[in-house]
């Protein structure tokens, strides 16, 4: 009986979705700061991020940008709030999926995200 359930697990393994906590839906930002993105506190805990950490956001067509992450209680766990300027740099729209990676910027004191 155990062999039968193990065989079923192997057959349906490709159909199961993998957990991807760093893939988030884009939502419009409330603040107008070009270098800040907002996440919920449980999502920041899951990704092991702290307030003020720098993150690398990967968008469409190999576009990337670096932003500072802040916590926001009004954002749901599967969404990220990104400013319009940053969305244009990433070539994403509202409702698209972006990937978030913790990024260490050595020797930085200020960060400006410019419109391209």
Image (tube, rainbow, N blue to C red):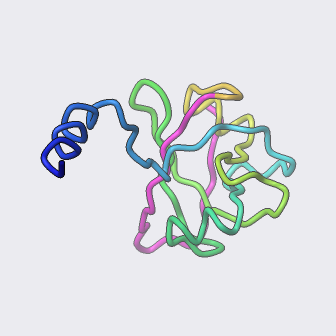
Locate residue 68, reporting x and y percent: 62, 61
Foreground residue, 55 or 4?
Answer: 4
Foreground residue, 69 or 72?
Answer: 72
Taking the image as shown, residue 83 lies to the left or right of residue 112, namely: right
> Residue at point 68% right, 28% down?
95
> Residue at point 48% right, 44% down?
99
Q: Does the magenta stretch include residue 27?
A: no
Residue positioned most to the left:
3
Relative to 93, residue 39 above or below: below
Q: Is the magenta stretch mostly helix, strand or loop?
A: loop
> Residue at point 28% right, 33% down?
12
Q: Is residue 107 magenta?
A: yes
Foreground residue, 55 or 100?
Answer: 100
Locate residue 67, reporting x and y percent: 59, 55
Locate residue 78, reporting x and y percent: 64, 47
Taking the image as shown, residue 53 lies to the left or right of residue 4, namely: right
Taking the image as shown, residue 36 lies to the left or right of residue 91, namely: right
Locate residue 89, reporting x and y percent: 58, 33
Residue 97 image-quadrant placement: top right
User: Can you say which quadrant of the picture contains the C terminus?
Assistant: top right
> Residue at point 43% right, 67% down?
105
Relative to 107, residue 2 above or below: above
Residue positioned most to the front:
1
Taking the image as shown, residue 75 lies to the left or right of residue 107, namely: right
Residue stretch in magenta: 96-116
Residue 27 image-quadrant placement: top right
Relative to 19, residue 93 above or below: above
């Amino acid at each position: 009986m155990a062999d039968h359930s193990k065989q079923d697990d192997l057959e349906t393994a490709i159909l199961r979705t993998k957990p991807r906590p760093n893939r988030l839906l884009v939502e419009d930002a409330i603040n107008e700061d070009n270098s800040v993105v907002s996440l919920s506190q449980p999502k920041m805990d899951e990704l092991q991020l702290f307030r003020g950490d720098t993150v690398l956001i990967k968008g469409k067509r190999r576009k990337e940008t670096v932003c500072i992450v802040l916590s926001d209680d009004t954002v749901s766990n599967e969404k990220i709030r990104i400013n319009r300027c940053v969305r244009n740099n990433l070539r994403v729209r509202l409702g698209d999926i972006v990937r978030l990676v913790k990024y260490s910027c050595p020797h930085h004191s200020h960060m400006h995200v410019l419109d391209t």
